[in-house]
Structure formats: C-alpha cells, structure tokens
Amino acid sequence: MSNLKLGVNIDHVAVLREARRVNDPDILQALYVACANGADQITIHLREDRRHIQDSDAKNIIHHSSVPVNLECSINREILNIVCDLKPHRATLVPEKREEVTTEGGLDVFSFSDEISYAVEQLHDSLIPVSLFVDPTLEAMTKSKQLGAEMVELHTGTFANLFAMLNSSLPYSNHSVKELELPRYELSQRLEQSLEDIKLSAVHANKLGLEVAAGHGLNFHNVAEMMKIQEIVELNIGQSIIARSVFTGLADAVKEMKRLTTR
Ligand code: PXP
C-alpha cells in the first residue's frame, strides 16, 4: 500500500473537448479510467474563464467519482459560492490570471491574506478542508498555517522548468520559459536550489502540522525527485499524464505514473 496519494488532474481532457464542444473526449470516461487504474484522487480546476472544466463537469465528477475530488479554485467570491455548493472533498485555493497559459506561481499569501483568510473561513463553514497552492518558501508555510489551511500544495513549476531545460528537448522547441535560457551550469545550480527549497518547505510545513502536497509540471522523468521527499504525501499531476495518454491510452499512462509514485 502506497503512503503517497496520486491526484490525477483531468482538466486537459476538457481542454481537448472544448476545442470542438461535442463532448468528445467525455470527461466522465476519463474519470472512470483514471480511478480504475490507480488515481487516489481526482483534481480539477474550475477556472473563472471556464476554459476547460464547466460547472456541470464539476458537479458530475464529484457525484460519480469513486475517489476524493480536489477542486481547485481562485478566491473569487462567485466561484467560492459555487464551490461551497458543490461540496468537493477538498478545495485548493490557487491564483488565477485570465491571460496565463497555466497557473504561474503560487498564491500570494502575503498581499491577499485578508481575502484568503475569508475564503478559508467560508469553505470551512461549508465543512470543506482547504489546501493552499503556494511557492516553496518557509515564510509561505508559516503564513499558510496562520491563514487556517489544513494543507499546502507546493508549486513545483520552477523545479520542473529547470529540470526540463536541462534534461529534455524543451530548449530546442518553441517553448514558454524564455527566462530560463541560461548556461547549463547556472541551470544546474538553480535546479539544486529549487529542490532544496521544496525539501525545506515540506519539512517546515510538516512541523507546523500541515499536510504537504506538490504539483505543477511533474512528469514521468522528474517525479523521482519528489519521491525522495518523505514529507510530501500527495502529488497532483495532469499535463504529463494526459499528454502521454495520446500515445499509450489513459489507462496505461495512469498505471505507469502510479508505479513511479508508489513508495
Ligand atoms: N496542482 C495545481 C494546484 C495546479 O493548478 C495544477 C495545474 O492545473 C496541477 C497541480 C497540475 O499541473 P500539471 O498539469 O502541470 O501536471
């Protein structure tokens, strides 16, 4: 039995569906296949712009899922009201910008502490446990605890981008991480630092009594680094699993990630 939960993020199935809006691929089929092949949790993000998951998807997924559903959302009041009605097993508060390609960076728990604290309270009033998606810094862990969260999810995007610049074809492609076009020795140093930040943050959060998840940009190649950090008890992974499923099918992609994330 693994002591690490694999959260499979199926938003990207809805991204593909929204390209045509003919309910193909069917998100509920993705839910069933993910659950049947190793997902311990389903993660979805109800974005303000509804670019992938729709309200009806969230409702159906929560209703039909055989594993807990982790619903990501912003601190927007309208969205929070919907989330409170939907009653997922957990809500993860994330930052959102309309123009971003994906969630860039963690929640700014310092500038928006009043809004976040209000959101945590509102979710707790609806008996929904809360995780905060934050950058891996000691200060963010301490602040998350003060804001009343039960859990933090460490944003692993910096680590993942550095890893990909060093170990994949990313630098030779038309990529979106231009700020990391740096000499390899500098990338290596930064990669080591990013791992250290994640490790120290996980240890600190754990000492504060927070559960620790991690996610963003994790894939079949870099996930081994996360597995070395014992304090991390959950990984939420989307893009890489759905991308691989184009070639192998979703069942095999989830199975393989489950194998790599079993301690
Ligand atoms: N965790 C959170 C909080 C996220 O916002 C996302 C992306 O929606 C993920 C995990 C999954 O990231 P990826 O799709 O890069 O695996």
Image (spheres, grey):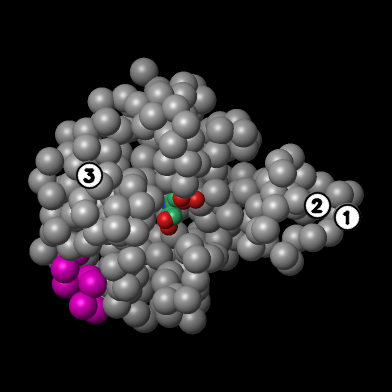
Under tag 1, what secondary structure?
A: loop
Q: Earlier in the sequence, mark 3 or mark 1?
A: 3
Q: Main secondary structure of the magenta part?
A: helix
Q: Going 21% across and 51% down the picture, which residue do you hit?
A: 23
Q: Is residue 256 visible?
A: yes
Dot 1 amino acid type: Pro
Magenta residues span 77-84
Q: Is mark 1 within 8 Å of ligand 1?
A: no
Dot 2 amino acid type: Leu
In the picture as drawn, the residue positioned furthest to the top comes out as 1
Mark 3 burial class by Cα count in 10 Å: few <14, some 14-19, many 20+: some
Measured from the top left, where is residue 18 in percent x and y? 30, 59
Q: Is mark 2 within 8 Å of ligand 1?
A: no
Measured from the top left, where is residue 250 in percent x and y? 37, 32
In the picture, the disc for residue 26 is 3
Q: Is residue 241 above or below residue 133?
A: above
Residue occupied by mark 1: 183
Q: Going 47% across and 41% down the picture, which residue do you hit?
A: 243
Which one is in front, 238 or 170? 170
Residue occupied by mark 2: 187
Q: Is mark 3 within 8 Å of ligand 1?
A: no
Dot 3 amino acid type: Asp
Q: Earlier in the sequence, mark 2 or mark 3?
A: 3
Mark 1 burial class by Cα count in 10 Å: few <14, some 14-19, many 20+: few
Under tag 3, what secondary structure?
A: loop
In the picture, the disc for residue 162 is none
Spatial CA span between label 2 and label 3: 40 Å
Measured from the top left, where is residue 263 in percent x and y? 49, 22
Direction from residue 29 to residue 169 in the image, left or right: right
